[in-house]
Image (cartoon, rainbow, N blue to C red):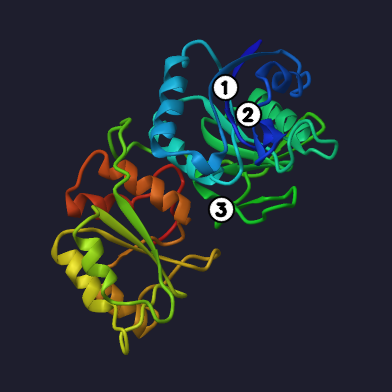
Amino acid sequence: MKEVLVLTTGGTIASLHTDLGLAPGLADDVLITAFGEVPDVTLSVEAVMSKDSTNMQPEDWLVLAENIYRYSEQYDAFIITHGTDTMGYTAAALSYLLLDFDKPVILTGSQIPLEAEETDAVRNLHDALTFASQTQLKGVYVVFNGLVMMGTRTVKTKTKSYDAFESINYPYIASVADGVMTSLFTPAEESLVIQPHLSLDPNIFVLKAFPGMTVDIFDYLADRFNAVIIESFGNGGLPFEKRNLIPGLEILTAKQIPVIITTQILEEGQDINLYEVGKRVAQAGGITAGDMTTEAIVAKLMWILGSTHDYDTVKELMHTTIAHDLDFV
């Protein structure tokens, strides 16, 4: 008999209509009945918080991780019901915070509230429980619309459709249908490259490059943040002619502030040295992020900075595959 603990956090799946629109409010005893029955599984529930996932913060990720560690000896698997809007961030963050955890942790939710007639919640809950009961894998995963995704690779790509999430630059782990899990890909075992820890430094900034962006922004960033992530164009390029952004990067790196360069393009990662516009960024000290998602970069950087601010160590760890977040830099 497998013991599974459901940690509830609110989200669309638990939302009810209010005068201000949908907001979490569904009782946990109603939610728990929607999982349905899975052979040889006992379900328990713990209400951790009740909020729209837009309001989720790094401190909430720590609360979830602490709860999972607290109950680690009592349960064989954990399911977190969560809003969809920041589920990718939470899944990535827990992938790092629970790096040495030896049991499966599954996040799921729904695009439509559980109590709505056309809800996708019942299917997602049952699929999450099926995966929790049948998988032999450890780590953090998202189960949604019949697919299982690695926590560090999950991105929400649709606002309304049932197939709201995609696995970016990484195979789907499994499919689930009618109480049956079909394995699609088995991640390789990873060795620990950093001491696991429950600490985060959220003092970072994500900057999306756009034509016409002022160069003065870098003076502001240099005085206020411990690290910066830049969503660049294409393979890692930033403008160096009119409104030249390269000196801004040099200001940050001169102060030993890590500047992580990712791309605004969702698929296939980056090759920063392919074009002059990217090579100049690399020469200015930009730290490439390869094929990582922005969600994973944000969570990983906060987690690394929670342990060290040493520039070279941050760079080395950002270039190290952790929780299957990275295939190349």
Label 3 secondary element: loop
Q: Earlier in the sequence, mark 1 or mark 2?
A: 1
- Kindly identify which residue carries mark 2: 135
As drawn, which residue projects farthest toward the front?
A: 19
Is 311 situated above or below 48? Answer: below
The type of residue carrying mark 2 is: Thr
**Of discs 1 and 2, which sits in the foreground?**
1
> Based on the displayed image, in which of its 4 quarters is residue 83 positioned?
top right
Q: Which residue is drawn at 28% across and 77% down?
A: 215
- Kindly identify which residue carries mark 3: 170
The type of residue carrying mark 3 is: Tyr
- Kindly identify which residue carries mark 1: 77
**Of discs 3 and 1, which sits in the foreground?**
1
- Answer left or right for 82 relative to 65: right
Is 87 situated above or below 264? Answer: above
As drawn, which residue projects farthest toward the left?
A: 254
Q: Position of residue 135 (x, y in %)?
A: 63, 29
Please state the total of marks drawn on the protein image: 3
Is 283 situated above or below 109? Answer: below
